[in-house]
Image (cartoon, rainbow, N blue to C red):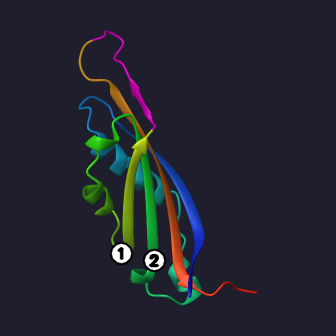
Amino acid sequence: MSKHRVLTEFGMGTSLRRRDYTQAAKRAVQDALWHNSINMAELFGFDKSAMQIDVEVAVQNPEAVDCNAVAEVFPYGQVTVTATHGGLDIPRPEGEGNPTVIANAAISVAFDMERLQ
């Protein structure tokens, strides 16, 4: 059996005032998930727990992302979350307070299966 990616989805999330990188990352993942209703596991005859979900979240301060908390957004599957540098921190117009944090997420879903020939 080999790992075969069957779906990739993208999302964006923000933390408007609290500079909460984890919350922005969770919102980016939720944004990606809520844009689709694909029953990929059923299509291939797998249980949903067989889904191998790889998540990459990009923010300006990746060390501030609690990857375990981001993984808890998923109700099933084998989830791996990686935080990398990217996204944006947008300063407040008046120059006071925390910037708005923007996170980007890419979600890939794969299964262990033989490639169709």
- Residue 50 location, x and y as percent? 43, 82
Region in magenta: 86-95
- Residue 66 location, x and y as percent? 25, 51
- Mark positioned earlier in the residue sequence (2 or 1): 2
Q: Residue at x 63, y 87 (%)?
A: 114
Dots 2 and 1: beta carbons under 8 Å? yes
- Name the amino acid, label 1: Tyr
Q: Residue at x 25, y 13 (%)?
A: 96
Q: Which mark is residue 65?
A: none
Q: Where does label 1 land, which residue?
A: 76
| Vertical order, 115 against 69 (above or below) | below
Query: On the picture, is 23 further left or further right than 79?
Result: left
Q: Residue at x 51, y 69 (%)?
A: 109
Query: On the picture, is 116 further left or further right than 36?
Result: right
- Name the amino acid, label 2: Met
Res 50 seen here? yes
